[in-house]
Amino acid sequence: MFIGQYEHSVDQKGRLAIPSKFRKGLSDGAVATRGLDGCLFLFSRSKWQKIAESVGQLPETKSSARVYARLILAGASELEFDNQGRAIIPGYLRKYAGIGSSAVVIGLYDRLEIWSKTKWNKYVEKNEAKAAEIVEELSNFEY
């Protein structure tokens, strides 16, 4: 299970250090792809396999299914970690997420999200104020 929030620098080669506590859950490999809300999703290889299979089952006759499949599958990249736990995030993914020299890596149960520090701070500021509304909207949600 991935939980927590960590800020890391991104070097000029596009390398980002993934926190060691997260790397344990990525021992079978990792796949990064375009996420939602302007971030990147990072999945373990086993979770990615399930996602890819699900996306592959979407009806090709639906425009929204084709768009989603193209964004998620064509945007995916397998990551390799060096001895320091860094992975090169491809330029097209960094550009998509607006990631420059600093990124925030957050754990969300079965995936990680990688955000530009600026986008993440704006997102949190915008949504923290309406957290009670959001939980109320999820009427079936229980702690």
Image (spheres, rainbow, N blue to C red):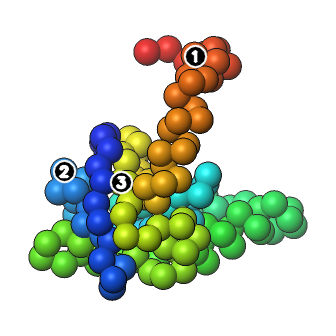
Mark 1 or mark 3, earlier in chain:
3
Q: Which residue is at a point 53% across and 67% down the rendered structure image?
A: 98
Mark 2 — residue? 21
Q: Residue 105's mark?
A: 3
Q: Residue at x 38, y 60 (%)?
A: 103
Q: Can residue 59 be seen by looking at this rendering?
A: no
Is 122 displayed left or right of 108 in the figure? Answer: right
Q: Which amino acid does label 2 sit on?
A: Lys
Q: What residue type is labelled 3?
A: Val
Up/down of 32 relative to 80, above or below: above
Q: Kindly identify which residue carries mark 1.
A: 132
Closer to viewer: mark 2 or mark 1: 1
Is 113 displayed left or right of 24 in the figure? right
In percent of the image, x 30 and y 54: which residue is there? 7
* Element marked by disc 2: helix
Q: How far apart are marks 2 and 1 (CA)?
A: 30 Å
Residue at point 47%, 45% (across, down): 121
The secondary element bearing badge 3 is classed as strand
In the image, residue 11 sits, relative to residue 45, either above or below, namely below
Location of residue 142 in the rendering, given as x and y in whole percent from the top left corner = 50, 14
Coordinates of residue 107 in the picture (x, y in percent)? 36, 46
Q: In which quarter of the image is the N terminus?
A: top left
- Residue 99 image point, x, y percent: 47, 67
